[in-house]
Amino acid sequence: METNAISRRNFLRTSSLAGTALCLGFYFPANAKKEQLMSAATADQLGFEFNAWMRIDTDGKVTLTDHRAEMGQGSYQSVPQIIAEELEVDLKDVNIIFAIGDPTKYGSQITGGSSTIRGSYKRLLKLSATAREMLITAAAAKWNVAASECYAESGNVVHKPTGKKFHYGELVTDASKLTPPTEVKLKNIADYKLIRKPLNRMDTPMKTNGVAIFGLDKKVPGMVYAAVERSPRLRGKIKSFDDAAALKVPGVKQVFKIQMLVFNTTRDGVVVIADSTWAAMQGRKALHIEWDDTGFDHINTADIYKAHEELLQKEEGLSFKKQGDPDSILAKADKKIDVIYQTPYQAHAAMEPLNCVASYQPDKIEIWGPIQAPDWVQGDIAGKFKMPKEKVIVNMTFLGGGFGRKAFLDYTYEAVAISKEIGAPVQVVWTREDDIRQGPYRAGISYRGQGSLENGEISALKFKMAGQNIDHWNGPARGHANESTAEGFLKPYYDSIKNISFADVPYEMPLPNMWWRSVYASTNGFAYESFINEMAVLAGQDQLEFRRKYLKEERCQQLIDRLEEVSGWKSRKKNEGYGVAITECFDSTVGQVVKVSRKPDGKVKIDQVWAVMDCGWYVNPDIIRAQVEGSIVMALGAATIHEITFKDGLVEQHNFYDYLMPRMSDMPPVEVHIMENTADAGGVGEPGLPPFSPALTDAIYDLTGKRVRKLPFNMNTI
Amino acid sequence: MISITVNGQHHDIDADPNMPLLWVLRDILGLTGTKFGCGAAQCGACTVHLNGEAVRSCVTKINRAAGQNIVTIEGLSDNNNHPLQLAWNEISVPQCGYCQSGQIMSAAVLLRENPNPTDQDIDDAMSGNICRCGTYQRIRSAIHKAAAMQPEGAKL
């Protein structure tokens, strides 16, 4: 009975859609392997909640949903660019909206792991081709002709023999009543009009005139503002606080204690509610709080790296991969090296500080904000506030950068908890200092590389890593190696190097850490590719030739050829340092060559960076170029400009005056090339980052003879 | 009451005279195109024009702007058609876009003062603006392109 009642309600709602729009979407059953494509009418028959990925109205207006966050990486352009291709509509006639968080309608929405395109392009192509075929079928039936005589173009179905046409809007009523075909023919790449074209991004105009709405720009009726003074140390508790001065600040309405959840720990804070952001911040400054931080180790950075080094010398760690017998070969070898690489802790420092608008009502929770994982937030809030999932509405705004930080659930939870406490919608605004000092951070990781040569060939490689594992929040003991131990390292090396091992030496530390753009590849890549360069030097061979010998896979060989050609590798001159690195990240391979020279004042400068990206099937070459350019700048900062350090358990940096950023004058010229092939799509937003620092330090070695093994280093003192 | 003119419109503001112009623009006037990035004049995301000069609105007290003319990104042009805005669109400069209002407002003062800036001029004028997405190379090209679009600018 109940099922029927739900079905009837759905019927009334979706059937009103069915007459006026063609809506297609997917249903992702929680326990099924494969999603189902369906129309509003089918969803109704099956009793599913329906939300369209694509909607065409009777006036011909096309509305496409971007199910992923737009944080700069271009989903707002690339998702519609895919859909419009197979649907045969012009992008200028398309309206784009962001999805709300709902994994049953959109599948995974976590915008991380460079997964938006590689994770959904096949599904999106099928969805839009299906809609096109339904419109063609509807037109053919109206004309009483064969569908094979009709084709779709620019939002119309055309009858080829007569030239008659119907606008899509005229067909949606009929098309919406059809059952979607199970098989549709997709276009050939050679016939693409939009995909693989360097189209300008549709979100650019609203990002040049102040119109784009980021999380911090969101206002809802009755909203107040909150600033929170949180414990400067994780697990810090409040001993006492005095709010008398804060409450005297004009505009301040209320002060109370709050507890933010950080993974499986908590962080105490004091909330100041006010009628403007400024008043809330002033009230916060006027608070007097005494913290009890006895529950937290008073850590120093130097101790962390000292502990890493000891572990790497003493422990064998947990084996991640082993082939052959590198240990006995290394023991006997005459020609070998044994070195340590170190990488720093890093903050994400997205330009838009964290913020979230939350409105808690007894029967509904609504959130707006810069959110990378709306589906995770929905599940998290529903669980923690005991609200049915469908009553938790998570709206994504544009994100002013994310880099992994905005896929975390602390700030959204805290905003809802504050709204619940005050019984009003609230915007919680983090300051830059909160962003830099609270974490979570990319963990600093140390590596030990051991390798030997026999007759100029690599006879054994042995790598160990020691550092905090992102997974360690899930339980106290892991018992198995970090699954990302070898991330970044190219798999074809395994075919040509017979004796090789990777191990993870567990190192526990209660500092909050999590993924940061390109995740483990961002640090692994530096160690492993630097080591390959060191082995090439030991062998007295050219670094690029050395790689050509070990990376026999065809796509790698082509990438190396291209890198050699575009960088003028063979025509390098005296007094120029050239360095190279090639890494894999999220199913894409990127190679970079960096060229450095000395300025008249003796300082080293980067003259040029050449990058070659092989991401297989791709959507927009200009977005790929932009992402690689940006990844290189982020890598440059992490390699040469900034790091997070700890003293007595406190972060030593505060704001951009002591957590410095690359600026215009630091920008080297970057040239990006894209390999043309039709292999399955790989990621784009992150893979350009890992090869930069090993290529740069290799170029510096080439120029100066100095090998940099610890990041960050100062370009001015090399 | 503090009187200010923003994008040609007169406003009487009832606020703490120490409130930075940034929060007056964003929270009181609803002009959210000007961004909060650091609160310490370090990143340039909050750059606006005060009597034609580029200032960091996050550290400019509203008191200091009393009786003066302010232009924000919303008022830079009538129709998103300032040469810089056109060039930004043509070159697809923004990624996340959060810093770009400030970048454009800084570049607008540069171009007015120096219609044909060199790379070094751009480095000098734009080094107060951080872009975490790393769009610097495109910002540089777009400034050169916008310079060429101006009647008095050099042709590329």
Image: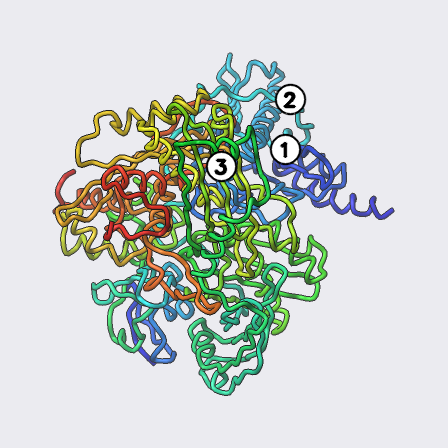
Q: Which residue is mark 2?
A: A183
- Across and down, in percent, residue A200 comes to 37, 37
Residue A419's image quarter? Answer: bottom right
Chain letter belonging to callout 1? A
Q: Nearer the viewer, mark 1 or mark 2?
A: 2
Q: Quadrant of the C terminus of chain B?
A: top left
Q: Using the image, determine if residue A34 lies above or below residue A526.
A: above
Q: Specify whether residue A84 is in view.
A: no
Graded by Cα atoms within 10 Å as few (under 14), some (14 to 19) or many (20 or more), the crowding at tag 3 reads: many
Same chain, marks 3 and 1? yes
Tell me where residue A632 sits by quadrant.
top left
First in residue order: circle 1 vs circle 2? 1
> Decide: marks 3, 1 in contact (CB < 8 A)?
no
Residue drawn at point x = 51 percent, y = 29 percent: A499
**Disc 3 secondary structure class:** strand
Q: Nearer the viewer, residue B47 or A341?
A: A341
Which residue is pictured at 62% across the width and 35% down the height? A24
> Mark 3 sits on what residue?
A462
Q: Locate the N terminus of chain B by quadrant.
A: bottom left
The answer to which of A552 and A324 lies nearer the viewer is: A324
Check disc 2 and give the amino acid type.
Answer: Glu
Q: CA distance from mark 3 to mark 2?
A: 49 Å
Q: Secondary structure at mark 2?
A: loop
Q: What's under tag 3, amino acid-wise?
A: Lys
Residue under pointer 1: A173
Query: Residue A617's x, y, as percent?
Result: 47, 27
Q: Is residue A504 left or right of residue B53?
A: right
Q: Does residue A710 sit above or below A196 in this rendering? A: below
